[in-house]
Image (tube, helix red, strand yellow):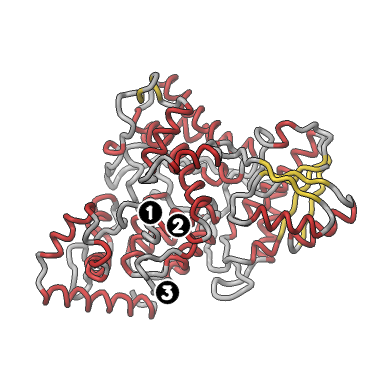
Amino acid sequence: MAIWVLGDQLTTAVGPLSRADTDERVLMIEAHDFARRHAYHPHKLALVFSAMRHFRDDLREAGYDVSYHEAESFDDALKSYFEECPGDELTVMKPASYGAADRLTDLVEGHGGSLEVVTNETYLCSEERFDEFAEGNEEFDHESFYRMMRRETGYLMDGEEPIGGEWNLDDQNQKFPGTEYESPDPTRFEPDGITEEVIEWVAEEFDGSYEEYPYGGAWADSEEFFWPVTGDEAEVALESFVDDRLPEFGPYQDAMLDEEWSLNHALLSSSINLGLLHPARVVERVLDAYVERDLPLNSVEGFVRQVIGWREFMRHVYRYDMPDLADANQLEASEDLPEFYWTGETDMACLSDVVESVRERGYSHHIERLMILSNFALTYGVEPRQLNEWFHAAYVDAYHWVTTPNVIEMGMYGSGVFASKPYASSANYIDKMSDHCSGCEYAKTKTVGENACPFNALYWDFLGRNEERLRDNYRMSLVYGHWDDKDTEEREEIAERAGEIRDLAASGDL
């Protein structure tokens, strides 16, 4: 018998390894063909492979018998493994990706073994509990789920009521700190020998382009790798966030500054999604700090909501609505993703800055993902699947279960499963929450004409093109009231400008 540890299940705190004797056999597989299926950022590949190799070494040091395979595919590795251990019985926590459990079972059985798929304990909400919630919740909304999670975990609760009297303090968390604001620097981890070896190998082995298979990360402009690759490093990153950035996380979590790529964000999602940190550990450390240091409730609640609310909700929305969710496109958008998502070559200051951050380190924070990258693609009319594939490849914390509901539904309003409206905006929102517009070649106040900000014409054109689908949405009534104020000539000018923008983007001249 052996425990199969997948690359995003690197933990002994929960799951089969938490209950196993240290002399039990462990199987781990690096399947390199997976790394060529998308144009993954080099930091993403270095992070995953380095974390796996460090976890292997930690297990061996603890006494586990680890059978570690570096192979082209799972099939090749399993063939080799079952030649050594014929007929072995494997146990694995259920993979998060749709259909993966069945595919792995077929592979194992094809080599004469058996596979027991058990509950994935790296999440807080079980499949059974979410299914029960979904059956009793006609609106299928995140806020109801979040309140359920608060009640069931007891986090930030005073008996049956939320601490402070309110469930959600988001109205306190939409402030702009000013252009001179400087946030504490996040902890950066110096690559050790294992990580250095992986970084060099990734650069040589996965150097393809984003244009054709075998894909690679040559599109990125990577700075020095700094992400945590072990549980100990992830703990240090957690402490750094709690000590230095959590107090002001809340009010400025939606802000965007050209010179502040991380602001007060936790930068823990990559560690949580690998299994290096359990979400309960993260939340409970934050709650301890809240009590010990009397931290602002809006910062603590805003962070807790992201972990126990949004992350868990996304996991189950993905599970619930796949496979249809991956190809959902209720607005029938069909434009190709502009090339500047890969190159950063655009005169739009906001897009250029955010894409450059992604090219350098495989990261930008959640509002940049939603209100700049997804907002542009939504109003431009990008086919949702193409944007989802880009996010999946570009971010260090991205997995199919993460990006698909966030991008297809929240960002692109692709299915209408839980998003109550499309998150589309003009330059006004970006100007309010960032310093990008002040130095941009495009004019934030102009909708048409020379150097008019593309976000403005695209926004109004989006409303016009999708009026039949969106006008009856009660959350869109105000903006359609403004659309009604525009006469035929103005609408035609907007449509013409939007067409010019698409032509410029397609030719690389935007």
Check the image and report above or below for 240 versus 39.
above
Q: Nearer the viewer, mark 2 or mark 1?
A: 1
Position of residue 48 in the picture relative to residue 390 (left or right): right
Residue at numbered disc 2: 357
Q: Amino acid at mark 1?
A: Glu
On the image, the x and y values in percent for residue 391 come to: 48, 60
Q: Quadrant of the N terminus?
A: top right
Check the image and report above or below for 486 versus 499.
above
Check the image and report above or below for 484 versus 474.
below
The earlier-in-sequence mark between 3 and 1 is 3
Q: Nearer the viewer, mark 3 or mark 1?
A: 3
Q: Residue at x 38, y 22 (%)?
A: 160
In the image, 75 versus 274, the foreground residue is 75
In the image, 491 versus 397, the foreground residue is 491
Mark 1 crowd level (few <14, some 14–19, many ≥20, 10 Å Cα): many
Residue at numbered disc 1: 368
The earlier-in-sequence mark between 2 and 1 is 2
Mark 1 falls on what kind of element? Answer: helix
Q: Quadrant of the C terminus?
A: bottom left
Check the image and report above or below for 37 versus 272.
below
Marks 2,1: beta carbons within 8 A: yes
Q: Residue at x 66, y 33 (%)?
A: 13
In the image, 228 versus 179, the foreground residue is 228
| Real-space Cα separation, disc 2 to disc 1, in angstroms | 10 Å
Residue at numbered disc 3: 336
Mark 3 falls on what kind of element? Answer: loop
Q: Nearer the viewer, mark 2 or mark 3?
A: 3
Mark 2 falls on what kind of element? Answer: helix
On the image, the x and y values in percent for residue 294 come to: 38, 21
| Real-space Cα separation, disc 3 to disc 1, in angstroms | 20 Å
Instruction: Say which quarter of the image contains residue 54.
Output: top right
